[in-house]
Image: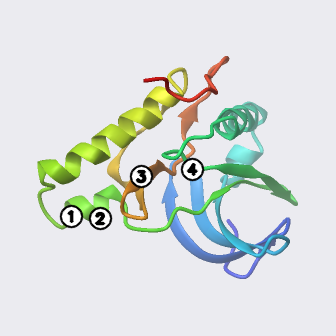
Amino acid sequence: MPEIGQTISHYRIIEKLGQGGMGEVFRARDTQLNRDVALKVLPADFAADADRLARFQREAQVLASFNHPHIAQIYGLADEEGTRALVMELVEGPTLADRIERGPVPVEEALPMTVQLAEALEYGPRARHSSPRPKALQHKDHARRRRESAGLRACQGARREPIQR
């Protein structure tokens, strides 16, 4: 896995943000556009497995087709000497897990969160998060939530149009 200060493509690793089943997530600096991004780096054994790598690339393509206020934007893929990463919007703020840790979530706070999550899931009904859990949900401006984890199961024909009400 990469180390702080290492560069993958034109993304300089700043700090580790977390770890999951599909790799580690880092804050990185896009040195071309001068902005911070989230870099999800695949473990070496995943990157070396042709089937897993193909699945990862399909998932990235499906995610990149989404344009929704509650789904983190995908900026691209990075590859540096066999290290492969998904480059995504950095969504800062506490996770839902952080909020739950503070104590019970009142209905008036939980309801908007639930609606936002449901809207994100409805937007891409044929692509579902493989493990929706509180640590994969983050605040954005404390009013909107984005699904930051890229662990979606890619399916053909994912819808791209916004939800009609």
Mark 3 is on which residue type? Arg
Nearer-the-camera pick, 118 or 38 = 118
Residue 94's quadrant in the figure?
Answer: bottom left
CA gap between label 3 and label 1 equals: 17 Å
The quarter of the picture where residue 61 lies is: top right
The dot on residue 72 is 4
The residue nearer to you, when weighing 116 against 80, is: 116
* Residue at the disc numbered 1: 101
- CB under 8 Å between callouts 3 and 1? no
Residue depicted at x 30% and y 47%: 113
CA distance separating discs 4 and 3: 9 Å
Q: Which residue is mark 3?
A: 145
Question: Given this view, does label 2 or label 4 mark the residue nearer the observer?
Answer: 4
Q: Residues within 10 Å of mark 4 (few under 14, many from 20)?
A: many
Drawn side of residue 152 relative to residue 77, left or right: left
Q: Amino acid at mark 4?
A: Ala
Left or right: residue 150 versus residue 31 is left
Q: Is mark 3 in CB contact (under 8 Å) with mark 2?
A: no
Cβ–Cβ under 8 Å for marks 2 and 1: yes
Marks 4 and 3 in Cβ contact (< 8 Å): no
Answer with mark 4 or mark 1, whichever residue precedes in sequence: 4
Distance between the alpha carbons at the discs numbered 2 and 4: 19 Å
Q: Secondary structure at mark 1?
A: helix
* For residue 15, side relative to residue 95 (left or right): right
Where does residue 106 sit, x and y in percent of width and height? 12, 54
Give the image location of residue 153, x and y in percent.
Answer: 56, 29
Question: In terms of sequence position, does the residue under pointer 2 or pointer 4 come before the other?
Answer: 4
In the rendered image, which residue does mark 2 sit on?
A: 98
Q: Secondary structure at mark 4?
A: loop
Q: Secondary structure at mark 2?
A: helix
Packing grade of label 2 (10 A; few <14, some 14-19, many >=20) is some
Q: Amino acid at mark 1?
A: Glu
